[in-house]
Amino acid sequence: MDINFKNKVVIVTGASSGIGAEVAKLFARYEAKLVLVGRNEERLKNVAQDCTIDGLLPLCIILDLTHPGSCETVINQTIEVHGKIDVVINGAGKLKMASIFDQSIDTFDELIAINLRVPYYMCQLAVPYLRKTKGNIVNIAASLSHRHTSGFLTYNITKNALQMFSEQAAVEVNGEGIRINTINPGFTRTNLLRNINIEPQYLEATYKRISEHFPTRVAIEASEVAKLICIIASDLFPDINGSNIGIDGASSLL
C-alpha cells in the first residue's frame, strides 16, 4: 500500500527546523496541502521552498505559539485557506536544562508552555475539524524522558505529560474516528542543543560525545523520524491509536 496525502491538509508546528522541517518536506513529497508554523521567518521560508508543489508554496504562519491567540490563529487561517484539517503534527518544542535546585520557576513555566500547553491546545482546537475528516494528530515527545538524568527535570516532565495526555485524549476521541498518537525519538540531530548554549563550532563534537552513551553510537537523523511520523499519520494503520511509538535504537532500554 502506498502512502498518499494528496488533497489532505496537514499542519506542522515547529516546521522551521529539525524533525518538523524534515516531516514537512516528506509530506510535500506525498502531495499534502501544508500549513507550516514556526517562529524563525527565514528558516521557515527556506523549508517552504523545499515543500513547493506544482509551483505553489505552503501556507506559512510565522508566530510564537505560546503567545495568546497564536494557536487560534493557526487553526483559523488553515480553515480560511483550505476549509478543513486532516492531520496535525505537534512538533514545536524546546529543550532547556533545569533542576530542582534552580532558584527560579521561569524555565519550568517556559517549557510547560511550549512542550505541553501548546500541543494540548492545538489538539483541543483541531478536534472539531478532525471529527469531520476522521483525521489524526501526531505529538512528538521523547523516548529518553523516562530516564532519570540530572538537569533534564522539567523537560522530562513535559514530555512524559505529553505522552500521558495523548493516551487519555485518544480514548476520548476514539468514538469520533480521530486518532492521537505520540512519536518518541531518541537523541536526534536537531537544533535543540543550541538551546542549552552549545556553540556551533562544538556541535559535532557534542553529538559524538553524547552518542557514545547509546547503543548505536550515532545520533538519529531527523529524516528517519519523519518517515515514521508520516506512516503513523497515514491511513495505512487505522487501528494505531493512543500509542507511544519509540524510535531510539533501544536507548531507552538501557
Image (tube, rainbow, N blue to C red):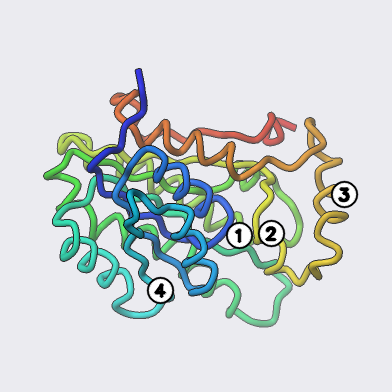
Q: Is residue 78 left or right of residue 240?
A: left
Where does label 4 land, which residue?
A: 62
The front one of 85 and 252 is 85
Instruction: List x then y, in percent, for residue 156.
Output: 60, 54
In terms of sequence position, does the residue under pointer 2 or pointer 4 come before the other? Answer: 4
Indicate which disc, 3 or 1, sits on the residue closer to the N terminus.
1
Q: Position of residue 91 (x, y in %)?
A: 47, 54
Name the residue carrying label 3: 209
Q: Quadrant of the N terminus?
A: top left
Type of amino acid under label 1: Tyr
User: Of residues 205 and 152, which is closer to you in this image?
Assistant: 205
Q: Is residue 253 left or right of residue 210?
A: left
- Distance from label 3 to label 4 (Cα)? 34 Å
Q: Is residue 49 above or below residue 196?
A: above
Q: Mark 1 sits on what residue? A: 155
Q: Secondary structure at mark 1?
A: helix
Give the residue type that dot 3 points to: Arg
Of the residues under marks 2 and 3, which one precedes in the sequence?
2
Asked if disc 3 and disc 4 are in contact, CB closer than 8 Å, the reply is no
